[in-house]
Structure formats: C-alpha cells, structure tokens
Image (tube, helix red, strand yellow):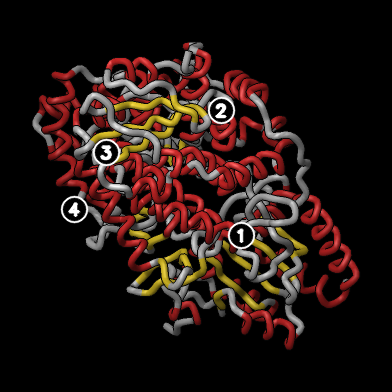
Amino acid sequence: MSLNRLQFEKSPYLLQHKNNPVDWYPWCDEAFEKAASENKPIFLSIGYATCHWCHVMEHESFEDEEIAKLLNDTFINIKVDREERPDIDSTYMTVCQMVTGHGGWPLTIIMTPDKKPFFAGTYIPKEPRFQRVGFKQLIPGIAGMWKYEPEKIKKATQSIQDGFDRSLEFESGMFPGLEAVDYAAEQLTQRFDNENGGFGTAPKFPSPHNLSFLLRQWFATKEDRFKDSVEKTLTKMRLGGIWDHVGFGFHRYSTDKKWLLPHFEKMLYDQALMMIAYTEGWQVTGKPLFKQTVFEIADYVSNKLSHKNGSFFSAEDADSDGEEGKFYVWETDEIDKILSNEESDFFKTTFNMLHEGNFEDEATKQLTGKNIPFLTDVLTDARSAQFDAIREKLLIERNKRNHPLLDDKILTDWNALMIVALAKAGSVFDEKVFTNKAKNAFDFIEEHLISEEQLFHRYKEQESSINAFADDYSFLIWAAIELYEATFEVKYLKKAISLSEQFVEKFWDSKDGAFYLSDKNSEELLGKQKQIYDGAIPSSNSVAMLSFIKLSRITGNTKFEEYANSIGEYFSTDLIRSGSSITFGLQAVQFINNQPKEIVIVDCKNLDPEITSKISSVFSPFKVCLFKHSIKKELEEVSNFTSDLHIINESTTFYCCTDFTCEKPFNDLVELMNILNSNSLA
C-alpha cells in the first residue's frame, strides 16, 4: 500500500490517514500553490485523533477507492489536526457555524486556493444518509459549480467573508459589574437540570468552569442554591457512565441527560478541569466522594496519560477494534466468568448491568447486549471496599483487550491545565506527589518548549514545533501563578511575569485591546480572531483576564490589571449579555468586584507546613497569597509592596491587605482563617 504525504508528519491524527488513497497534503504552501496552478478548489478536512465520527468518515470515504478518486480528481486535499492548529480550526469552525448553524468534527470545508471557503459541513457519508448529502453527490456538484458557475462561488465566498468580518467585531463598554455575574448565574440556574445535574438536556458536557463560577457565586452571596447545583452535578457525573468506574477518568461527554451513555474518548483537558472542579467541590462540601474522585483522576492520568519525562499525553481514543466504546463495555456472561457468583451478583446489581445490555446504539437506540457500569447512589464505605477488590479483577481482565489509540503528542496548553489541577489539588490536600508532578511538568515545558523567548505549542518525538497560540501563553501563566501559590517558590512568579510580557508583546492588540488567538506575525487566514467564549476549555482571554488581575495583586504592578481591565472592556457587551457562556471570564469579574485580598505571610524561617495546609484547605477564591522570608529578599524583587511588611513578636506574621493597603499585622492563625472564610474584610 502506497503512503501519502502525511507519512512525514508527527500528528497522530494525520498519521492515521497516511495510508488513505486520498492524496492528502498537510497544511502547507505547496498545497495552495498547486491548487492555484491547477485551478482546483481545496478540500479541507479537520479533525483529531480520538474523534469517533472522524474515524467513521475515514473508513466510509477516505479509505474508499471510488471516493478517493473523486476527491483527487476534483480537489487538492488537505488534512489538519485541530489540536495542532487551533487557529485554522477556529477560523473554519466559525465559518461552519455561520453557514450551517452548527459545528463539530470532522469539519469539512471546500474553499478556493486563496483560502476563501464556499462550502462548510461536518460529517459527510459516502451515500446520502440522515438527511445529509453524500460524497458521491456532493463532489460532482462542486466540480460542476467550480467549472461552470464561478460567479456563484465568488458570491458565496464574499458573503462568507462578510459574515466572518462581522464575527470579529465586539461591542466594547465599561468593565462589567456584579450585575453581569448575577444575570449569568440566573441564566445557568434556569437551565439547571434539577433531577440529573448539569445544564440543559442531551448531549451534556461537564463544563467544569460553570461549576467553579457557581461556587464563587455561592461564596459571594451565601445562597445555597448555587452550591447545591454544583454538588448535585459533581455527584451525578461521578455516579454516571461518563466516569470510568473500572479504570478511572472522565469520558468526553454524555449523549443522554443522565450522564449514562458517553462518547468514550478521554481528553487530558477534561481530566484537568474536572480535577479542579472536584477539588473546589471538596473544599466547599467536604464530601469524601469528591476527594476520592480527585485522587482517582490523578491515578488515571499517572497510569495512562503520563510520559516518563514528566509531561502529559493528549488523549485516549473512543474506538478500539473499529468499535466505539468496545474497550469499556461488558457483557453479563463475561462478568460471570471473571468474578465469583457473589462478586458477580454484587457488581451487576450495584452497577445496573443487564443481560440484554444497558448500552444503546446511538443511532438506532437498540440495546446492544453490552453494559456501561453506572451507579444510582453513592456507595457506603463497606460496599466501596467490596467494589475495590472487584474493580482490580475487572481492570486486569480489561487490560487484556486491545487498547484504544493513545494520542501521544504533548501540548503546552493542555499540559498547563494539568499543572494547574495538580498544583491546586496538591496544595488543598497537602499531597506532595501532586505538587511534584506539577513542578516536573512545568520544568519539562521550560526545558523543551521554550527556546530563545519563543514558546512552542507541540512536542513530539524530541521535536518542539508550531509557535505558541494564545491558549499556550494564557494557560501557562495561570499554571505558573498556581505553582507559586502552592510552593511559594518565587521562580514561578518570575516566570509568570516574563511569560506575560512576551504574551503582550506577541499577541496584544495595542489599538483596540484584548489578545489575538495567534501571534501578530502569524499566517493570515480570513481575519485575526480574538476568543472570549468558553468551550470545552476556557478561552484564552478569559484566563488571561483573571491571571493578570491576580498577577497584579501579587506583584503590585498595576499594568497587569490594566490589561485585564482592557479585556473586560473590549468584550463588555458579550460578558453582560451572554455571560453564562463566558463563565471563566466572569470569574475575573467576580474576583475584582468582591473585595479581593492580598494575604502576605512573613516569617524568618521556611513556612510551617501546618499553616500552609490549613490556609490551602479553605475555599477562599477572592484572594492571592504570598510568603515573604524576612531575611531573604527574593519576593521583594518582584513584589515591591511587601518590602515594608515585617515580622512581629518573633512569630509567623499575617498581613491582610486590600489594594496593597494592609491592615494591622497579627500572629493568630485562627483570625486569618476567619478572614479567609468570609467574603469581606469587615
């Protein structure tokens, strides 16, 4: 079998297509030059390695000789890994959503050699199906239009370009106040599923940043309904089939409203963001299940998504042996063979296993004879211990199956999210193993993904490549700040500052404000996008807004807060009107409008671990925390306002400050804990 040009790429997704009879190009100048010289349109297919419907379309069409010939005769064909090139994906996904009213992957774009799209869609079958046009009809239709109706194509490209230009416009205004926060919280509350947790109906995504936002709303208002919504959602997700009860970790999303039937891919970013949400959920509720979930996510990541060099892989696929979820589902006869009669009865009853199966085919809704384990209630300690022994047996047996593909590329932004999660959990639970893993991953990025003032997006096979995007900078700054507050090692604070300065230099729109998705000197597509709406992960501008506010409060350097304020002003109208879709950005609004505190701890020796453990265990989201060694001057180099803060009574001293103006110092840890548990200095 001959190999196409994708054989020379490093992306696992592109390499999946190296044997296709389709004459694929990666995204490169050669492809566009060839399209122009041969007067052919571009067929652009965007996906990712763990995407089920990407696999379906490849098997149906891209491995099919008939369809491949049609594609090769009609187009210059380009494959893009959306996780490697989020700028390309975001640009053409915006087009797809404009043209069709929806989006998703695989993303299919047909465009001119100068990158102007005139057709957009997602999954396309070989033959017409599900009211979708098939390739056998689409390609001849496009070929005819290209040859005989160029004016129609020109009109379509101009209409799409005009719409895209409008999508780049945001209505600026004043930095939002708490009214925007309250409105978004009410919007989420109205969409809350009181029975099953989560928001809206099927399909359901975890959206952990929504949960973190509501916990902050509870802390600010003390209205228990916000906390209760989060607690129910975290509990229901942990009980459902979206959680892998045998091997741990969260699947990407649920196709039903009860969190029972997942799409089975496991993404690094989901593990990180869910780990953060469950950590904060434990801080607020003290619920043992939430702490258990944090530790089990960490266990999954350590076992399946960790490289020996300290970094983290991207994802595990949904499919194995050509079937989605095959690795994760069970037949009752199989359970009976693995377990004793007593164990089998316990497992099948407790985890809702049926002989006819509880796993429906997504398309036909027919039962498959397969089962996804899920719970209807939290296990008692005794039943949990009973399941632990059963789980080990099932895991050993499951590991004999063919495993789903591991997407082993290392992405800076997703690694940064896991660093945040591990640093936060390590601090909250006083778990040094987590903190050390976060530090090791950060060290890896510093050593391998930063070179001569350039941050890179991807590492694979000892090669760093693809200049960083806004998410890479924004999330890594967040990670550095989180690591500083977890360790009080000033080197992380210095790194946050230097990364922030680079970020501004390379990505900041000095005319209108806010950060571009790609750096100012990057390849021009349809236009330079700025992102504020949260998807599966928070947007770069949302994270930057909160991180820059915190960095300003830690360092006393108000220029960082000015950048954050400019972001809030630039996206003001969207934050006010559509805040329930920008909840991470609204966390910055919550922080700045809820009397944020700067807590400075001063001591003449290294900080007592018992003090840090108590401080970290408390959910106090509107604060930053600094440690100043009264003899060493390292912190003062980057945080001038701490220079006049000294130890008193020869004992650990606490300063509680607002806008860098500090109250009278004190030595009583209980007094500090009372302040942290309050949402005001009063």
Q: Which residue is mark 3?
A: 426
Nearer to us in this view, 255 or 564: 564
Label 2 amino acid? Gln
The structure residue drawn at horizontal position 20% and vertical position 51%, both measured from the top left corner, is: 399
Picture coordinates of residue 52, whole percent (x, y): 47, 53
Mark 2 → mark 4, Cα distance in angstroms: 49 Å
Task: Answer left or right for 260 relative to 168.
Answer: left
Asked if the residues shown at circle 2 and circle 4 are in contact, with their CB atoms under 8 angstroms apart, the answer is no
The mark closer to the camera, 4 or 3, is 3
Task: Answer left or right for 571 relative to 189.
Answer: right
Q: Is residue 604 visible?
A: yes
Q: Is residue 114 above or below residue 33?
A: above
Mark 4 → mark 1, Cα distance in angstroms: 48 Å
Label 1 amino acid? Phe
Picture coordinates of residue 216, whole percent (x, y): 49, 24
Choose the circle earlier in sequence order: 2 or 1: 1
Mark 3 → mark 2, Cα distance in angstroms: 25 Å
**Label 4: which secondary element:** loop
Label placed on residue 507: 1
Counting the numbered discs, the total is 4
Nearer to us in this view, 283 or 620: 620
Mark 3 → mark 1, Cα distance in angstroms: 32 Å
User: Which quarter of the figure has residue 663?
Assistant: top left
Choose the circle earlier in sequence order: 4 or 1: 4
Choose the circle earlier in sequence order: 3 or 2: 3
The mark closer to the camera, 4 or 1, is 1
Asked if the residues shown at circle 3 and circle 1 are in contact, with their CB atoms under 8 angstroms apart, the answer is no
Label placed on residue 590: 2
